Structure formats: C-alpha cells, structure tokens
Amino acid sequence: MAKELDLPYGPYALTDDDIRANVSGSLAGAYALGFTVADGIFDVDFVGRSADDLRRKLLLHTPYRHPEFIFTYCRDEAEAYERECELYHEFHPRDNLVHPAPPLDSRRSCKICGHHR
C-alpha cells in the first residue's frame, strides 16, 4: 500500500554497491524494503531494524527480492524498535509475517498495540 513515509534516506537500489555507498556502518536504524510506484510514493513490502549496524543488516537482504530500500538512523536499539513498530502498524507490510520482536533482554512492548514476547 502506497503512503507517505517518514524515512529520510532513499530510495536506493537494494544492491551491495548502493548499500555500501549510502548507509553508514555501526549505527542503529529502521528501514523499509519495496519499490517506488508511478506517482513517486514508496510501496512498502517489508520493514525491519538494526540495533547496531544498519549497513550489515541491509546487506543480508541481497541478492534482493525487493528492488529498493529507504531508511532512517536511530539513536539506539530501543528507538529502532519503536520506529519499526510504527512502520509495521502503518503499512501492514505483506512480507512481515509477525509483529516485530522487542529487543533481547528487554521488557519493552509495542507502544501501539502492547505486543511483547
């Protein structure tokens, strides 16, 4: 489903070269995978996060099933989890089979629906 999305970086091709050129390593972040539709809106198929190395996490998605990615950096793992939950509830991405899990060793729950381990 195509909607406006508050992920300031991208879209970029989901390739090793574009990930390495556009994503800093050793930083937390949240991302969406999908494609840009004719009206320039990003159509989200999958959302995810990284607690500490967004570049490495995105590289795990190549070779790609999704043509593009967009992302944002986050302060820490907790913020990345919250942002991933927001994206999950906003876009109901077809390739996310379950609700995002909270960080390990955390009692954190989703601020939107209360989901926890």
Image (cartoon, rainbow, N blue to C red):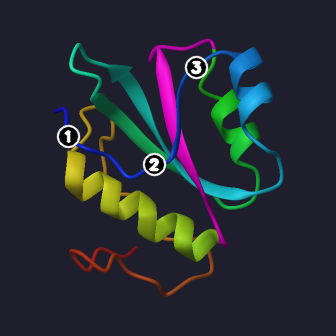
Give the number of the mark in front: 3 or 1.
Answer: 1
**Where is 83 relative to 40, above or below?**
below
Could you tell which of marks 3 and 1 lies nearer the N-terminus? Answer: 1
- In three-dimensional space, the C-alpha distance between marks 1 and 2, rounded to whole angstroms, equals 12 Å
Counting from the top left corner in percent of width and height, residue 92 is at 20, 45
Q: Determine the image quadrant of residue 35.
A: top left
Element type at mark 3 = loop
Q: Earlier in the sequence, mark 2 or mark 3?
A: 2
Q: Marks 2 and 3: CB-CB under 8 Å?
A: no
Which residue does the numbered mark 1 point to in the structure image?
A: 3
Res. 14 mark: 3
Residue 101 % position (x, y):
44, 63
Query: Which type of secondary structure does the marked residue at label 2 adopt?
Result: loop
Could you tell me which quadrant the N terminus lies in? top left
Q: Residue farthest to the front?
A: 39
Which kind of residue does numbered mark 2 sit on?
Leu
- Which residue corresponds to the image point at 47% horizontal and 14% vertical from the top-left? 67
Which of discs 2 and 3 lies nearer the camera? The answer is 2
Place of residue 96 in the rendered image (x, y in percent of width and height, measured from the top left):
33, 40
Label 2, on which residue? 7
Vertical side of 32 occupied by 113: above or below = below
38 over 24 or under it: above or below? above
Q: Amino acid at mark 3?
A: Leu
Q: CA distance from mark 3 to mark 1?
A: 20 Å
